[in-house]
Image (cartoon, helix red, strand yellow):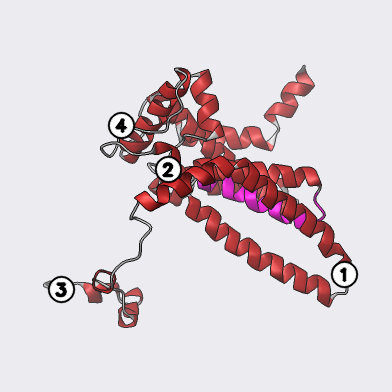
Amino acid sequence: MNSILKNILGSPYTVLLLAVMAANWQLVFLHSGLEWDMMNFWMPWRYYMSECYNNGIIPLWDPYAQSGYPVHGDLQGPAYSPEALLVSFLFGQNIYILNYCFVFYLFIASVGMYKLTYFFTNRKEVSVLAGIIYSLSGFNVAHGHYFYIIVSVALVPLIFYYFFKILNKGSFMDAVKFALIIFWHITTGNPSFLIISGYLMAFVFIFYVAWKIRNKQAGEILPVLKKFTLVLVLSILIALPVIYNAMQVIPLTTRKDGLDLAYAGDESFYYQNFIAFVIPLITITNV
């Protein structure tokens, strides 16, 4: 028993958890609650979805938000989120649960950055520090009321961790885990984070292929390509209902449309304005 307790207390994951809980003690001990978009959007969405599922109703239409809209096709909504579904069935959704979900995702962020840093450095102390700094960064504090951004912050390090692990002779099980993480992100996170991550991974993969061909190791490319093909196929198959519903809703939305020239040119940042990076006060008038 003593050895088990010692292993738990000495685990880097325990250190990460305690650091996240200490930094967010107001939320952990319910001294304070989350504000702004968390209360105006995410809490009503998650509560409505939870009530629907727990009463045997598929949340296709939300009559309370935006004068009614098809919530099942909203990639920002939690209608298909595995985390939101599990929490809804186990505990329901309320302000207290939202506090703990927020802290949970910060912990996942710290774990993801720890694993990614350890993959490259093989040093626990450095990796733990990186996990703490990443999860408690100013970006997360500033975007704390955007739940899906916090989810993306939590999952992106894990996405890159499994990506690089597969490049470094990872297993097919790593590919399955990679696909599940991508599905989690699609259903719960911000799509833009996944798209940008996809660009970066595509660039790294092209560089990897070129490097292997240059070093006459082209035979190592095919096994890696097979695993990434498995990731792509599994991700699409698992997320197919979400993708199909989103495609149904896209024609009904206008936010994806481009901007007209007059609106895009309003208060534009011209190249002359770059001087403000050197002399910030030059932009001030009537002083």
Q: Earlier in the sequence, mark 2 or mark 4?
A: 4
Instruction: Give the amino acid at mark 3.
Output: Thr
**Depth order, front residue of 270/54:** 54
Q: The N terminus is located in which quarter?
A: top right
Compute the Cα span from label 2 to label 3.
Answer: 43 Å
Dot 2: few (<14), some (14–19), or many (≥20) neighbours within 10 Å? some
Dot 4 falls on a residue whose secondary structure is loop
The residue to which callout 2 is attached is 74
Q: The C terminus is located in which quarter?
A: bottom left
The residue to which callout 1 is attached is 217
Dot 2 falls on a residue whose secondary structure is loop
Compute the Cα span from label 1 to label 3.
Answer: 61 Å
Instruction: Give the amino acid at mark 1.
Output: Gln
User: Closer to the observer: label 2 or label 3?
Assistant: 2
Q: Which mark is residue 275?
A: none
Q: Which mark is residue 285?
A: 3
Return the x and y of residue 207 as percentages of the image width and height: 71, 71
